[in-house]
Image (cartoon, grey):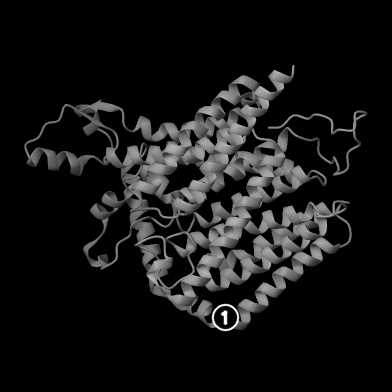
Amino acid sequence: MSGSFLKRTSQWNALAIAVGVLLAFSLFLGGASREHMVPLAAIELAALPVLGLGLYRLVATGAWRDHRFLLSLAGLAALLPLIQLIPLPFSLWASLPGRESAVTALELAGITPGWLPMSLTPDRTWQAFLAILPPVALLVAALNLERRVLARLIWALLAFVIVAILLGALQITINSRAVYPWETTNFGSLVGFFANRNHMATLCLVAIPFAAALAGRGLNSRDRSANLRLWAGGLVIGLIIVALGAIQSRFGVLAAIPALAGGVMIGWISSGRSRPGPTILLLFLGGAVGLAAVGLFALDPILDRFDRESQLEGRYDGWLIVARAAQDFLPFGSGMGSFDPVYRSYEPVETLRASYFNQAHNDYLEIWLEAGWPGIAVVIATFIWWGRRSWSAWRAGSHPDRDLQRAASVALLLIAAHSAGDYPLRTETIAVVFALCCAILAGAAQELRPGRTRRREPSPSGQEPARRHA
């Protein structure tokens, strides 16, 4: 009996450790979306044992049945690039929409290939498949983890955000290349471990609702660390607001208010939907102090960022070009990872500049171009899943599990909103954090009945009653 228990415990520990290693690799090495083949390879290699252990546990426990829809979405996202790599007869390949220019080029060169993959850039499509493995692996593995383990991973994420902000403070203070982890980066800006300040802003925004949720766990608790969690949550939120002002990301500034509102709502529900208690007041205080510091020291640079219209106008013009190209490649798309060469072939001469449009700065448009209607169908299905799970989480009562799930719901919405004007999910860091949030939110329909409160009576043995974890 004890031997079987120890064996199961070691398996859970191995899985938790593997997930922690993958998360750490992704946070520290996954902050760039290009020119990072070696760090990306390290993250992908770390994902393989996590994926294997996670699949084994899902099958062994039968937990996969509780998450069939979410696992199907993850599987489809991973299968799309592989399907685009299946070789097709040249006659069939040439009949696909959008291949006319490629066919003409092959004819002029006197080349008649035998079989070709659907993707116009098979090497980049293969890289896109490998890049999907880490978030899929973390999702599969995290679905097996207990809530307390997931909470510890969130604490680790918040600690990383603080370290990244401190590194960013050095970056804008000493203004040296030595403190920037990537060669191609927003030099002179607070980017932390990212190459792009906008993605650093995304991570900071994601941390706000989780800081509120973990602070709320101290409410109505006799634990001596309750007050520490309350103060830690408020201080983290205040620090993040100050950091967003220093990052000077337009989306970061605009989304700070809804992120704070989500955090306050989480704190209010944690207090039993009663009159504002210490948690909510502390969250308000942390956000107010941060906003006051931003207004005092960083208001002019932020307003200057909003006054720069040329970059935004160029982005909108690029979206029209991407949409036109996507229409030509429907219904199957041009191939995952093919955006850059396809966009260059459609870009008008009069829009050419010294800098180039490396991404669409709108992930939904880019998915439409690269994956066609199948890719958009996966996106729509993901939003439907998010809506159903969020509804279950937000209508439930106060409970630590629900607090984390509500925070995950807000975090996913923030990432989705930023994806409409940028490409945060193209970095492994945000992609893996996205997967972790999905795993947390996935339990909203299984763990507890709606309205169940935080307090639970102990079992006669003096221990918590066993409960099922998604």
Q: Which residue is mark 1?
A: 299
Image side of residue 96 versus residue 133, left or right: left
Image side of residue 207 versus residue 264, left or right: left
- Residue 284 location (% of width, % of height): 76, 68
Q: How many marks?
A: 1
- Residue 210 location (% of width, % of height): 68, 54
Q: Residue at x 82, y 55 (%)?
A: 226
Foreground of the two, 140 or 367: 140
Image side of residue 224 versus residue 58, left or right: right
- Residue 251 location (% of width, % of height): 53, 65
Foreground of the two, 69 or 201: 201
Foreground of the two, 93 or 449: 449
Foreground of the two, 54 or 442: 54
Q: Residue at x 75, y 48 (%)?
A: 403
Whether residue 30 is visible, yes or no, is no
Relative vertical location of residue 403 with respect to residue 140 in this rendering, above or below = below
Quarter of the figure with residue 107: top left
Q: The residue under label 1 is which amino acid type?
A: Leu
- Residue 177 location (% of width, % of height): 38, 69
Q: Residue at x 52, y 57 (%)?
A: 418
Q: Quadrant of the N terminus?
A: top right
Q: Quadrant of the C terminus?
A: top right
Quarter of the figure with residue 297: bottom right
